[in-house]
Image (cartoon, grey):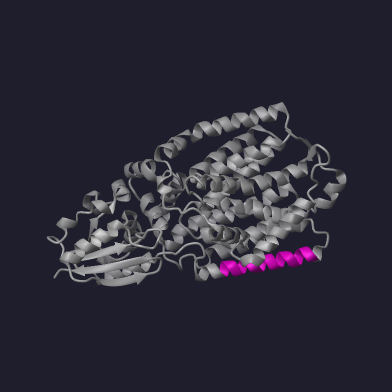
Amino acid sequence: MRSVAAPSPELTRQSRRELSPRVAIPLLLAITAAGGALRFLHLADKSFWLDEGVSVTLARLDLANLLHILWRREANMALYYGLLRVWLNFGSGDYFVRALSALLSVAAIPVLYRLGKRLFSSTTGIVAAALFSVHAWQVRYAQEARSYSLYVLLTALSSLFFLTAVEEPTRRRWAGYVTFSLLAIYSHFFSVLVVVAQWTAFYFMQADEIVQAEFRRRLKIIGLLFLPLAVFIVSRGTGPLSWISRPGFAELHRFVLDLAGNGGDPLVIFYLGCCVVALASGGWARGRRLSLESWRYLFLLSWLFVPVAITLVFSLIRPVFLPRYLLTCVAPLVLLAAAGLARLRARWLAMIVLVLMVALSVRGTWAYYGADFDLAREDWRGATAYIVQNSRQGDGILFHSAQARMPFEYYAAAHAERRAVHVIFPAYGDAGRLSYLDFLANAKNAPLPAIPGHYGRVWLVLAHNQLKDGQADSTTMAIEQYLGSKYTAPAERDFSGNLQVRLYVAR
């Protein structure tokens, strides 16, 4: 293990450009306010897509069914579902539901400042907070009713307490590290990779025996309390992720663009250049000694690359690479870029580059307001309104994907005509209530033979029913063949995100 030396006085004077609190605090408040404005702007313009509908409907389940579905399928993001369950007691509607994620994302901005200040200087912290506040990928997931904003916030807090605990250990800091690491893991499984990245960085840090023993003890505590989720992961395997494709060059390029903030290749180049400047001027090892400043860069590199590398390597066996699962890697990227900008001797050049990066990031955010850049969002709001407004008393509705019922139920609750449509499948709950079995149902088990005798009109909702080659799956074809033999040719209506609604009428 390499030893860690304190940074030289000359390097410290050159690299730490400190801002006075009178300047830093107002700047941070302004940056946080601007980031909040971007996150709350157009918050409810877009419809919930499938995963968001699942989040809200799952959080509204009674406790017994909620615990069943968490153990059977949805243990990932369990902490977020618990928070959302409490949040929904105070309001509903797209804006209010998503506001929870937006607030969590805003809270991460000052945490990025604290990380930058802790690692290098208050100037670095301000620049990192500025880049993070306008980052299009962060804004995009701040406007989604899922756990990603919580995941980013908690992994950032875990890393902040990790740094403070290993450099200036106290019981409170170690307790904070364990607490936020566990909360992060229970907000998203991929937080485990951040803990692995922290362990990797710690391996190269020469700490005294007491700190090493304390760190190992905390890792054991985290491992012990993570055990229930580990059992879940082992018992369920990667089945819930079986729809993910093995990444190719196009997917990796898209990931890099997302990581840089949806500003195109120019923004990627700016980030790369800033990171190179930071690493080149980071006071790297002279001889066999690794300076504390260099180790901090190593920590950021570990946080940035270890989760990505592990995910890509595992994907060679079973694809699990999904860019949004690596959203936490934005934090070390902006911290490295901010360190590079803070180390440019020509302050006018640093300011020009920062303005250009912010402008490209804002452009990427503005483009997101018009259209998603990382998924094809289904228009469940429009599809539900179409079904409800054109349905008749006694109509039946059949969902090809069991979970597709969840966003439909969310939006249908706002329509008085909802009672006119009877759910044929999935419908395992009593008195029309949702059961955990409705989340797990397979349309192969839909009661097709019983449909013609009970329903003169049947709505078929098709979503997520295509194979990787773009063809409809066998279940879709079986349902279409049966309904086509009993009803007239269906009237069809397509909605965005490969969402299709068909109406079958008895002959």
Identify which residue is drawn at 58% across, 53% down.
107
The spot of residue 373 in percent (x, y) is 52, 65
Does the image show residue 361? no
Position above or below: 445 against 407 = above
Residue 357 shown in magenta? yes
Residue 460 x/y as whole percent:
26, 64
In magenta stretch: residue 269: no
Q: What span is colored magenta in the figure? A: 349-366
Q: Nearer the viewer, residue 479 or 68?
A: 479
Residue 9, position in %: x, y?
A: 86, 44
Quarter of the picture containing the C terminus is bottom left
The answer to which image quadrant residue 396 occupies is bottom left
Question: x and y percent of residue 366 in the render?
Answer: 56, 70
Q: Is residue 382 visible?
A: yes
Residue visible at 65% across and 62% down in the picture: 268
Residue drawn at point x = 35 percent, y = 61 percent? 463
User: Does residue 281 appear to the left or right of 336 in the view shown?
Assistant: right
**312 or 325, nearer to the observer:** 312
Side (left or right) of 274 relative to 158: right
Point out the image quarter for the N terminus.
Answer: top right
Residue lying at the far left of the rendered structure: 453
In front of the other: 424 or 381: 424
Q: Is residue 226 left or right of residue 169?
A: left
Please give the count of numbered marks on the rendered protein: 0
- Is residue 239 rendered to the left or right of residue 115? left
Residue at position x 80%, y 66% from top?
348
Q: Main secondary structure of the magenta part?
A: helix
